[in-house]
Image (cartoon, coloured by chain):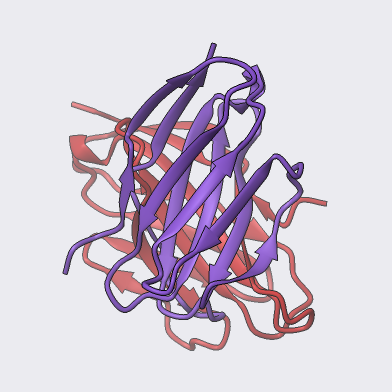
Amino acid sequence: AQKITQTQPGMFVQEKEAVTLDCTYDTSDPSYGLFWYKQPSSGEMIFLIYQGSYDQQNATEGRYSLNFQKARKSANLVISASQLGDSAMYFCAMREGETSGTYKYIFGTGTRLKVLA
Amino acid sequence: KAGVTQTPRYLIKTRGQQVTLSCSPISGHRSVSWYQQTPGQGLQFLFEYFSETQRNKGNFPGRFSGRQFSNSRSEMNVSTLELGDSALYLCASSFSGGLTDTQYFGPGTRLTVL
């Protein structure tokens, strides 16, 4: 079974509008970390935002916020006021391993976002 | 603070050759991980090094190996290259590789095998 699922292979959003990128995860570990990365066409993975499993508040970083619903095991990324420069591939990732003792990052398959002018 | 650097950025090799990729982590970071990214397989974890020891390993053949030096710099070696090894190889560093540690990625090395 997929540990990280991103069901939207591609999305379009109009400039200045908000967009939500979906991510669901699967783990039995009580402690884990959830991350979002952006990968422009240049290839470099850029860290956007982090949410810990015990964090009570949803994480926010500027125009990025993470809609964390623990019971549903979802960690959706919300980008407000989209900009043309937001066009990129977005990856959801999870860091787990408390039970096994071997921490690994697990990445989803990504969502390609295109911002339209 | 300087980011993660990877050299070379681009590489062209032929089948059967071997290649060594280098990664310099962010200063103070002791955990270095390597990933292979291809259009078909996505982002796949290769291995992680911490304090010169391989701590985690993905499901790759033994042709893929790595090491980490005392200054935390890491190298990845691929021997007997195959066409399917053509990919973007990404290196990422974090402070300790702990559960809540954020990994920061380098720009990647794009390897083409002819």
Residue A40 place in picture, x, y as percent: 32, 37
Q: Judge by depth and name the residue closer to the eye, B78 or A43.
A: B78
Residue B103 at least partly seen? no
Q: Residue at x 51, y 78 (%)?
A: B51
Residue A63 place in picture, x, y as percent: 24, 60
Q: Quadrant of residue A7?
A: top right
Please identify the quadrant where the C terminus of chain A is shown.
top left
| Residue B21 vertical placement versus A13 (above, below) | below
Residue A46 at least partly seen? yes
Q: Is residue A108 left or right of residue A16?
A: right
Q: Quadrant of residue A29?
A: bottom right
Q: Is residue A7 left or right of residue B12?
A: right
Residue A23 place in picture, x, y as percent: 57, 54
Q: Residue at x 58, y 63 (%)?
A: B48
Q: Judge by depth and name the residue closer to the eye, B12 or B69.
A: B69
| Residue A16 vertical placement versus A64 (above, below) | above
Q: Judge by depth and name the residue closer to the eye, A94 or B53.
A: B53
Image colour assigned to chain B: purple
Q: How many marks?
A: 0
Q: Quadrant of residue A58?
A: bottom left
- Residue at the extreme top: B114
Q: Judge by depth and name the residue closer to the eye, B89 or A9.
A: B89
Q: Is residue A14 left or right of residue A69?
A: left
Image colour assigned to chain A: red
Residue A91 place in picture, x, y as percent: 49, 48
| Residue B17 vertical placement versus A107 (above, below) | above
Q: Residue at x 83, y 52 (%)?
A: A1
Q: Residue at x 32, y 72 (%)?
A: A60
